[in-house]
Image: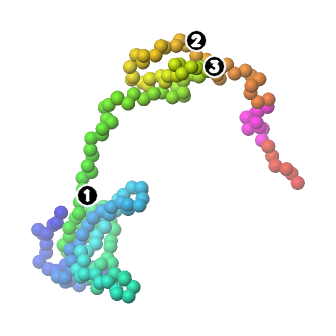
Amino acid sequence: MMQGHNRPPFAPTIPGTNLRSHDVPTAIIYRPARAAATSAPRSRHWVLEFEPSRPQNLEPLMGWTTSQDPYRPIRMTFPDRDSAVDYALKNDWRYIVREDRPRRIGPNPWAGTSSHQLYRGVDTSKEGWVQMGQPTMSEHHLPKGYGASENTGTPQKSEAEFLDPVLEAAIESFPASDPPAWIGTTVSGRRG
């Protein structure tokens, strides 16, 4: 987006001064991209920079990149796009706004399909109860998940055939004494 239809007839101001010059380059307003090496969300601020007005030079001895461009180090941040545009208009700068590309939301290949038929784990009620004794290979089966067809091809067992190991445990199998945190007493340090 470039706006110039209401430009004043005089030259824009030089950044940092009240002087006017026709040599001020076009300001570029954009929102910086997320760094590739991080999983952090993209920053919300907007940046105003100037187009390069002079080429960069390569320093032959050390290989540093230098420039004689006085506008190259100017980088201003703004909380939103409109405040950056207002600042550019206040200084009579020509500007270009680089809009965000629209997010491409493709079709979800898993939406609306139930072909994977998930199974329930052992933490659910009844179907997850552990049967006492060693089951044979023919008795190994996983109960179907919610929404799956009820006809699994395996014979269903009644509730009487399933045993809950927690309910079947005897009181003698628990520890003889509870830890102090369970009975409410506190253990204090040695007094000296």
Give me the residue at 42% from left, 16% from top: 153
Question: Could you tell me if the residues under marks 2 and 1 are in contact, i.e. CB atoms within 8 Å?
Answer: no
Disc 1 crowd rating (10 Å Cα; few below 14, some 14-19, many 20+) is few
Taking 192 as reference, is 115 left or right?
left
Magenta extent:
177-186
Please give left or right for residue 26 compared with residue 139 in the image: left
Q: Is residue 184 visible?
A: no
Task: Tell me where residue 40 appears, x and y as whole percent.
Answer: 42, 56
At x 34% / y 87%, what residue is drawn? 60
User: Which kind of residue does numbered mark 2 sit on?
Assistant: Ala
Predominant secondary structure in magenta?
Answer: loop
Q: Nearer the viewer, residue 132 or 180?
A: 132
User: Which is nearer the N-term, disc 3 or disc 2?
Assistant: 3
Residue 44 is inside the magenta segment: no
Q: Residue 133 carries which label?
A: 3
Would residue 96 be found to the left or right of residue 151 on screen?
left
Considering the image in quadrants, where does the C terminus appear? bottom right
Q: How many marks?
A: 3
Kind of residue sitting beneath label 1 = Asp
Q: Quadrant of the N terminus?
A: bottom left
The disc label shown at residue 30, or none: none
